Amino acid sequence: MSKQLSGTATKALAVAAATPVALFAAYSAVSHLYYRRSNIATASEVYNRVTSDKNRMADPIAWDNYILAHAESNEQRYSLPPLVGLRVSVEDSDFEGMQTFVLNRRNLNDRAVVYLHGTCFVNQPTIYHWRFLDSLARRTRAEVVAPIYPLAPVHGHNEAFAAIEGLYRSMVEKYGADSVTLMGDASGAGIAASFCQLLPELGLPQPERLVLISPWVDASLANPDVAAYEAADPMFALQGLRRIAHTWAKGLDINDPRVSPINGGVRMLRNVMVFTGTRELFHPDAVLFHQRVNAAGIHSELHVGSGLNANYPLYPIPEANRALEEIVSAVSMD
């Protein structure tokens, strides 16, 4: 009897030990075979789905309250997130009244990156932005400049453009347009694309390259293909995005190129790079923007992250390392 019990216990232990292995194998199979991404990227999506504002975006009252709460907080001086752990030098300064962070300012700098953070026109940069910029600064000879530009709901596109114009002009004067990269993610990428379309009117040259990470290039999100991506997107809800877009437009037609650069001219652009994931609702318009730039005879590269979410180059996942390599190479190109 004791031998029988011992055998049963051994089998039970073997099954218990094998269960985590089987679960991990199934998890890996789903990640690699179905989503075609790393296990860490799958875990990142789960984390984003749990911590994002998507549910709040889908609730008009909760989202309106969230936006209004930023009317005061966005007017306060921004502080870097705790434990951000930057390895390059960082200066918290002001440029013509706009708080501006400068990373990696050194005598050997011979180029600049101006980075416009995203987060739906209403949120300040996250720890992921700073760690991405830290990695970019460490691996290039660039002075990386990240303005805390005016945000909604108090401010809109015109005030942001005015503030960014002076900063961009100063970088062009310091390094030359051929040594300046303008870069942004999500809503920040949309601002960057619109700003470049306005440069001829401002009498300013185009940056050497325009790097767009998960760009929100159509504020209306009216493309019928977009709705099919909403369920897969763990971070954004169409209803909430459209609502904040109207707030940012400040009465301007939502289809105007100043808030929807996909509707603007693209022949003046130079060396565009677009990064987009297949599980983000900005994906269809990002691809369309790339196609329109290419059709205009302008060099544009499209980097598609299979099974990845918005802003994937910013996150601590293996796929981000490959994207960062591409960006570093472009920024460093002479």
Image (cartoon, rainbow, N blue to C red):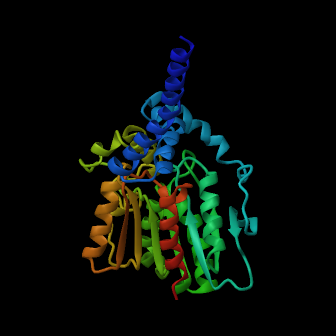
Q: Is residue 239 above or below residue 268?
A: above
* Left or right side of 303 for 206: right
The image quadrant of residue 228 is: top left
Query: Residue drawn at (48%, 28%), measured in percent from left and top?
Result: 15
Q: Residue at x 36, y 49 (%)?
A: 35
The x and y percentages for residue 201 are 43, 76
Q: Can residue 125 be seen in this view?
A: no
Q: How many labels does the image show?
A: 0
Q: Nearer the viewer, residue 83 or 182?
A: 83
The part of the image, by quadrant, that contains residue 294 is bottom left
Q: Quadrant of residue 9?
A: top right
Question: Which residue occupies the extreme top position in the image?
Answer: 1
Residue 12 visible, this orientation: yes
Q: Where is residue 68 in the image (x, y as percent from the top left)?
A: 57, 37
Compared with residue 53, is residue 295 higher up or lower down, i.e. above or below? below
Q: Which residue is drawn at 39% across and 77% down?
A: 269
| Residue at image coords 61%, 41% | 70
Examine the rendered structure and indicate whether residue 308 appears above or below residue 143.
above
Query: As rendered, which of 159 and 289 lies closer to the eye?
Result: 289
Query: What percent of the width, then of the height, locates residue 120?
Result: 49, 48
Q: What x and y, as percent, mark residue 204?
A: 49, 80
Seen from the viewer's position, the closer of residues 111 and 267 is: 111
Name the outermost residue toward the bottom.
334
